[in-house]
Image: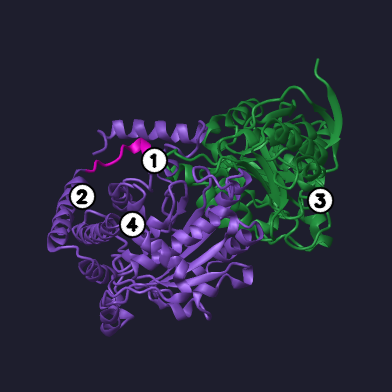
Chain colours: A purple, B green
Amino acid sequence: MMQFLAPDGTFGVPKEYAQYGELVDALTIEDLTKFYRDMARIRRFDIEAIALQRQGQLGLWVPAIGQEGAQIGSGYGVGPNDHIFPSYREHGVAITHGVELMSILKMMRGVNHGGWNPEETRFHLYAIVLGSQVLHAVGYAMGVKFDGLVGTGDKDKDLAVISYFGDGATAEGDVSESLLFAAINDSPIVFFVQNNQWAISAPVEKQTKVPLYRRGEGFGVSGMRVDGNDVLACYAATKFHMDQARAGHGPYLIEALTYRVGAHTTSDDPTKYRSEEEVEYWKARDPIIRFEKFLRRQGVADDFFEEVKHAGDELAAQIRAETFALPTPPLENIFHNVYSDEHPDIERQKAWLQAYEQQMGGHE
Amino acid sequence: MSSYKDMAIAKALNAGLQKAMQDDEKVLVFGEDVAELGGVFRVTEGLHKEFGEKRVFNSPIAESGIVGTAIGLAMRGYRPVAEIQFDGFVFPAFNQITSQLAKLTYRSEGFMQMPVVIRIPYGGGIGAVEHHSESPEAYFAHTAGLRIISPSNPNDAYWMIQQAIQSPDPVIVFEPKRRYWQKGPVNLDVAPMPMHSARLLREGNQVTLLAYGPMVTTALQAAEIGAEEGVSIEVIDLRSLAPVDYPTIFASVQKTGRLVVAAEAPTNVSISSEIAARVAEHNFYHLEAPVLRVGGFDTPYPPSKLEEAYLPDADRILEAVDRIMAY
C-alpha cells in the first residue's frame, strides 16, 4: 500500500513509489494548505448537513466523514479537462471541481434529482444505482478516444475520465462490465474505488475474496492500493494515473483504503453491526488530523488553522440559511424534461394538474 | 418525382442506418456481432466495411455494458445505435435502459439529452429456442422518458430508423423479426409521416382493427377475409407504441364504434390493455361494444412447436371480430 503520511503526520516516500513522490514534491505550500482547507471545509459541511437532516430540513444525508483525504486528494489529481463520474458520496471531489455545495443539498432536500450542469463542472450527476455510472464513464472515455483526444501530447486537448465507486459497488455486474469494456478499448479512464470497509452493514469481506485493487487483473486492468486517509498519496496516485490515461496508457484501478466513520446515511444505525473499538481505531487514523500534524511540521502556524475553523463555521451558517430559504419547486417541474421534445401524454397531464390545482385553490 | 426501390424490411433498416451514418458522422453502430458479420439478421451488413471500426464495432456480450456505454457516448456528443441481439436478451440491460437512459434528461433538468437508439428484433414465429421470440415492449412503454416505435413495412423501416436516430430522446425500435424478409417499395426521397403517427392502412366502417409490428400483416389478412365474409374492417398500423397516436385511433373508433387490438404480446398489462382503457375512457358514448384484445396468452412464450397456437393469426382475430359484431 502506498503511504506517504503516517498517522502521526511524518512524511516519507518509499523507494518503490519514487515517481509518485515526485508529484508530491512539486506541490507548493499553497497547494498543501488548499488541500487542508478543502478537507476541513467538507468535514464541516458534512456535520452541518447531518444536523440539517436531523432537523427535518433534508430528506436524507450521506456523510463522507473520514473519506476527505481520498476525495480531496484524488479530486485535485484530476486535470482541468478531465471528466468525473461520481457515486453519491463524493462531496469532497465535487468541491475540487466547482460544484456548488447547495446543489448537493438541493438534491438531498428533494428539490431536484441533481440538476447541476455536468458539461460545465465536468463533475457528472450523482448516481444512486450502484455501479451504473461506471459504465457511463467508460462510454464517455470511449468517445474521448474516438475524438482523438488521447495521447496527442497537447495538454490543452488531452483528457481522461475518472469514475468513483465504493467497495459495495464492486459487486455490481456493471462494474465488472466496465472493467472489461475499458480494457478491450484501452480507454483513458481511472477507476477510483474508495474502500470504506462497509457496504451499509456488510463488511468488505462479504463483497470480495481478493483485495479490490486486484479486481481488474482478470479483465486486464492493473491496480494499486493507496492509503485513502493520506491525502498526498491519493493525490499522487490519481494524478500519476490520470496523466498516464491521458497519454494513452489507461485504464487503471486505484483502491483507496479508508473508513466510513459515520453512518451509511442518516437512515442507518452502524452501532448494530460494528464495534466502537473499530471506529476508534480508524478515528486515530483520521486524514485531517494527520495532515494537520504534517502541515504544522512544515511550519504552518496556528492562525491558519484558526482561520480555517472560522471559515468552516461561516460556511455552516451560510448553508443553513440557504437551505432554509430553498423554495419548493413549482409543480410543473414534475413534467419538465421528461422528454426533450413535446410529448402528448405529458402535456395532457400537466394541463390537467394545473386545472385541478386551480379548482382546488392552488398549491401551497 | 420520388425514386422507389423494392427492399425487404431488414435491408430497408440497413439502408436507413447507412443513410443516417452518411448524414451524421456522430452516428455509431455497435452491439453483439454487428461488425464483420453484420448482425445475426444482417441488418448492419456492410456498415463496418463502409464506416470502419471506429463507427461500427462489436461489443462484448454484455447487454448492460452495451447500453451503459451508449449512454456515456451520448454524453460525449455521439448518437449511438445499439443492437440487442434478441428480445429475450434485453433484460440484463433493464436498469441501464429504464433507470438511467430514460431518466438522465429529467435528472439533469435538461442539461443532458440522450439521443440513443436501441434496436431490438422482437416477436415469434421463426421456430426459435426460448428467449428468441418474446414481445417485451410493455415493460419499456411503462417507463417515462423512452420513445418506442415498431415499423411494420420496409418504407417505415427505412424512415423510422432515421427519425429515431434524429430524436434527441432515447428511442427503442422494436423490429418485427419474422417480417424481416418481407419486401415492399421504399421511397428514398420523402419520409411518409412523423415517427409517432399511426397510419390508416385500410378503410372500413364496422370494426377498427389496430395492430403493430409483425401483427400488421396478419391484421390485413384478417380484414381481407372479413371483407369476403361481409364485415367491413378498418385497419390501423399503430407504428408508435410510446407515445400512442390516440387522435387517429379515436377518429376511427368514433366512426366504427368497435375496436379490436391485436398484438403478439401477452394481453395482461399490455400496450393493448392501455389502448383499450383509453379508448373506453374517451369514447364511451361512441362504442357499440367493449374493446377486445387478441394477443399471446399470459404464459411464458411456449416451445416453438406450440407457437402457431400461441400467436394470434387471422382466424383468431376474426373470432374476436365475430364476438364484437355480436354485441
Q: Residue B68, can we see it?
A: no
The chain to which mark 2 is attached is A
- Distance from Cα at disc 3 to Cα at disc 1: 45 Å
- Distance from Cα at disc 4 to Cα at disc 3: 45 Å
Q: Quadrant of residue B236?
A: top right
Q: Name the one closer to the observer, B147 or A219.
A: A219
Residue type of the residue flagged with mark 4: His
Task: Assign a secondary structure to mark 3.
Answer: loop
Residue A328 on the magenta segment: yes
Report if the CB atoms under discs 1 and 4 are less than 8 Å apart: no
First in residue order: circle 1 vs circle 2: 2
Q: Which residue is mark 1?
A: A334
Report if the CB atoms under discs 1 and 2 are less than 8 Å apart: no
Q: Which residue is mark 2?
A: A319
Does residue B267 appear left or right of residue A276 in this picture? right
Q: Residue A324, can we see it?
A: yes
Q: Which residue is mark 4?
A: A91
- Distance from Cα at disc 1 to Cα at disc 2: 26 Å
Report if the CB atoms under discs 2 and 3 are less than 8 Å apart: no
- Distance from Cα at disc 2 to Cα at disc 4: 14 Å
Asked if badge 1 and badge 2 are on a common chain, one would say yes
Q: Name the one closer to the observer, A176 or A95.
A: A95
Residue type of the residue flagged with mark 2: Ile
Residue B170 position (above or below residue A280):
above
Of the 4 image quadrants, the one containing the N terminus of chain A is bottom left
Q: Name the one closer to the observer, B123 or B96.
A: B96
